[in-house]
Image (tube, coloured by chain):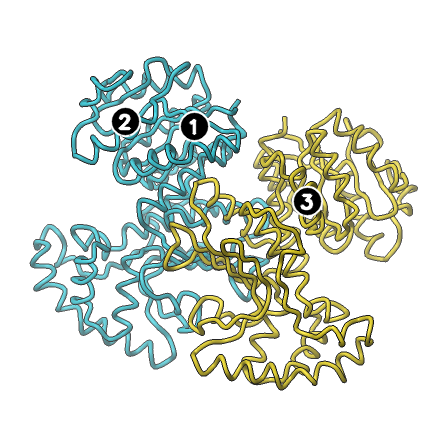
Chain colours: A yellow, B cyan
Amino acid sequence: MKKMALLLMGCGGVGRQLLRHIVSCRSLHATQGVHLRVVGVCDSKSLVVAPDAHTSELDDKFLLEVCRVKEDGSSLSKLSGFGACQVFAHSELTAKVFNMASHLGLAVVDCSASSETTEILSRAIDLGCCIVLANKKPLTATMEYYDKLVSQPRRIRHESTVGAGLPIIASLNRILSSGDPVHRLVGSLSGTLGYVMSEVEDGKPLSQVVKTAKSLGYTEPDPRDDLGGMDVARKALILARLLGRRITMDSIKVESLYPDEMGPTVMSVDDFLSKGLPLLDKSICERVAKASVSGKVLRYVCVIEGTRCEVGIQELPRDSPLGRLRGSDNVLEVYTRCYNKQPLVIQGAGAGNDTTAAGVLADILDIQDLFP
Amino acid sequence: MKKMALLLMGCGGVGRQLLRHIVSCRSLHATQGVHLRVVGVCDSKSLVVAPDAHTSELDDKFLLEVCRVKEDGSSLSKLSGFGACQVFAHSELTAKVFNMASHLGLAVVDCSASSETTEILSRAIDLGCCIVLANKKPLTATMEYYDKLVSQPRRIRHESTVGAGLPIIASLNRILSSGDPVHRLVGSLSGTLGYVMSEVEDGKPLSQVVKTAKSLGYTEPDPRDDLGGMDVARKALILARLLGRRITMDSIKVESLYPDEMGPTVMSVDDFLSKGLPLLDKSICERVAKASVSGKVLRYVCVIEGTRCEVGIQELPRDSPLGRLRGSDNVLEVYTRCYNKQPLVIQGAGAGNDTTAAGVLADILDIQDLFP
């Protein structure tokens, strides 16, 4: 039985779902000859590790208790009395990873949303660990950090950084490794903006669509976090770098759906929704109508082609995969030598803790051959 | 530099394209720290190996000469005078593989269309080799052979057996390993039948559409090889077995687009095209019209759901991914726990030597961690 030691960073929705998936897949993975040993879990404050990471692990009962405690909004330190474990302050994380990594094959799994994990991931690579990321921040940091994180290409996986569990990164890696050059990527990579654009296409006012999306839980608490396009820009940067472009966030042209004078420092969320957004209804409505005249629809997409890397509204043919998109699915069109006139298209749910965690778990199993 | 020894079986269009890809990707793969050593190539009659497979390989000049000779329709034995190699009769293949495999990590790559490779692949697995298949036949043989071939799941890849290079098998394997159960697969997995069904949807007579498809090179020399559905049935069997169904070809319900009395033993290709097919125009046309009444279109698909595994014409909603399909692209809809209401959709060119060989090459690089 192959044993893979895992250290999980981040116990938010994705991290907890990953722990639940690991527990529920025990017998499945046993049939595949793999056992996932979770030797440590940390959040932004505390680190909980198995008593001896080389011989023991946090057992399933403990992992489910981690989920329960974090679900309640409590701190991991609350677990000090529960079962066999050691609790440390977050500041000791680096030392502990160093200690574990030097003695056993370790995969460091980043399900946080923090930029502070970048340094530890970078050290983990130096120590010969594997890293698996759902967190976009480390891969959108400086080129120096990026180069370090991907310096051992077989030791990193990050499917869930783009399109949640959709097999986007894995498919692009296959295409790249077979020497098929990617000429052009066009993708709708925000479920929220996908929903918004298909609703305004039906003639609904932007302000009303955003309010509905918020009430359905499709947006961040402040919808401007979605409408500003920075989340899509981060995904675009990850894809562009995967294709070999040596660029940073600054190089990406990002179109925000709201002007600076409606920004978070200027007005509250409530004011934005009730007073700001309605002022934008007319112009979006006119753009929809104008596109419609030539058989096109508006989509909020990322476009990566040559040196171009843009995020914003594009007019696209109504009968293209992106034009046909309805609701909150993500879609990516990939144009290569092999997929030339018609693109390779990957489409499906691109958000949600369940599918994001499933993508992380598939990544973990994908690196199993590197473990003894 | 990681060195992977490869033995290629089959020098048809896909095998030759693979050799060309390997040669043209040399510098790309060098940057990834991998060198692909082709130590042997065989067709149905001869086997050509490097003088000493442990220390030497067939060089790029030689590999391109293999392509040239086979393109001309000549035998591999013609290469005996060209560069450093040894030529053997095909009957010595097993002994040679045994010899190579026992001394070095070897991947046996099957780009043939023969059922005779099944035995050698099965032995290769016993010897600890990896196997990479574009050939559907071995995976659609008996359950005994199938069980043997997949007995070391990390040592087999077969992306190009279904949908050419489309990332279908890789994506399904990711989904399965993350414990996300696949409830239902529906796919249009024949470019030929995809083209035929979308053309008859436009009101063209079946007989005319098939003649056009044949003249465009979309069909086999005898179009009944496509219209009979057996090629799609083989792909359906591979997908069903991947999902864990223990079935054989006999268990698959296959709808042929022509009746037995127009079969190859009854009439010639010319008679089939000029006299047989036109008799079928009316009934297909009526089925198209009937489906259209309820907003549906006809597609020739495979459906795998529960114990059901069927291949044939289905009425599908016009606005579903399969219903929207035009031309010769393949499409697969995957319904799982994570992709529940809306499926995961993978779409693109599912045929052609270039993309098929690219899929094989991506598979080869995917197993690199198993090589020393």
Counting from the top left corner in percent of width and height, residue A273 is at 75, 80
Q: Secondary structure at mark 3?
A: helix
Q: Which mark is residue A22?
A: 3
Q: Secondary structure at mark 2?
A: strand
Subunit of mark 2?
Answer: B
Give the answer, above or below, for where A259 lies relative to B110: below
Subunit of mark 1?
Answer: B
> Disc 1 vs disc 2: Cβ atoms closer than 8 Å?
no
Q: Pointer 3: residues within 10 angstroms few (<14), some, or many (20+)?
A: many
The reply to the same-chain question for discs 3 and 2 is: no
Q: CA distance from mark 1 to mark 3?
A: 35 Å
Give the answer, above or below, for where B121 lies relative to A79: above
Subunit of mark 3?
Answer: A
Looking at the rendered image, the disc whose residue lies closer to the viewer, 1 or 2, is: 1
Q: Residue at x 37, y 44 (%)?
A: B161
| Residue A130 lies in quadrant | top right
Amino acid type of the residue that numbered disc 2 sits on in the rendered structure: Cys
For marks 1 and 2 on the same chain, the one whose residue lies earlier in the sequence: 1
Q: CA distance from mark 1 to mark 2?
A: 17 Å
Q: Residue at x 27, y 16 (%)?
A: B86
Residue behind mark 1:
B36
Residue B47 located left or right of residue B359: left
Residue behind mark 2:
B42
Counting from the top left corner in percent of width and height, residue A29 is at 61, 39
**Can residue B151 be seen by looking at this rendering?**
no
Q: CA distance from mark 3 to mark 2?
A: 44 Å
